[in-house]
Amino acid sequence: MIRHCTCCGKPFEPRPQVPDQAFCSSPDCQRARKRQWQRAKFQSDPDYRVNQRAAQQAWSQRNQDYWRAYRDAGTVRLSFSGKMHSHLAGILRQKTRKNTHSNALESIE
């Protein structure tokens, strides 16, 4: 029995062990399935919300310098899509050009 994936819409053969399977095995579709489950669980289960918040706070306490080290490494990773990504990329390019230009002027003086 062929079904169409809820995420990508491509046809797939569901596993016999999962009769109600709605997502194909593509990694992107599996990520979407997990996000959907987490969102629903977060909204419907107060214990899950409390546990997730506690886990985030514990991680934050164990890794207090994470964001400082990330910024110091000079790594810029944007996970935005579409217009927002283009807009932010443009801003970063402008700032880089201004910094490069001002550094060049300082070296001349």
Image (cartoon, helix red, strand yellow):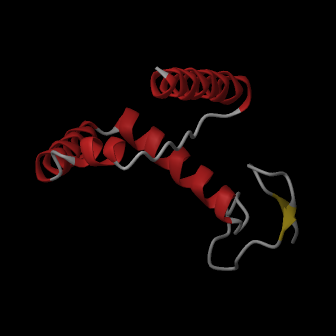
99 left or right of 91?
Answer: left
Which residue is more in the foreground, 71 or 45? 71
Q: Is residue 33 left or right of residue 83?
A: left
Q: Determine the residue located farthest toward the front in the rendered image.
A: 109
Q: Position of residue 33 (x, y in %)?
A: 59, 53
- Residue at coordinates 45% horizontally, 22% vertically from top-left? 106
Q: Nearer the viewer, residue 103 or 90?
A: 103
Relative placement, left or right, of 11 versus 36 is right
94 on left or right of 66: right
What residue lies at 68% left-to-right and 69% top-to-bottom? 19
The image quadrant where one finds the N terminus is bottom right
Query: Compared to 25, does 101 lie above or below?
Result: above
- The residue lying at 52 percent from left, 44 percent from top is 77
The percent position of residue 49, horizontal first and vertical second, equals 27, 38
For residue 92, what is the image quadrant?
top right
Q: Quadrant of residue 15?
A: bottom right
Give the total of numbered labels. 0
> Where does residue 5 sit, x and y in percent of width and height?
78, 56
* Residue at position x 88%, y 68% in the image: 2
Q: Position of residue 57 (x, y in %)?
A: 16, 42
Q: Nearer the viewer, residue 65 or 81?
A: 65
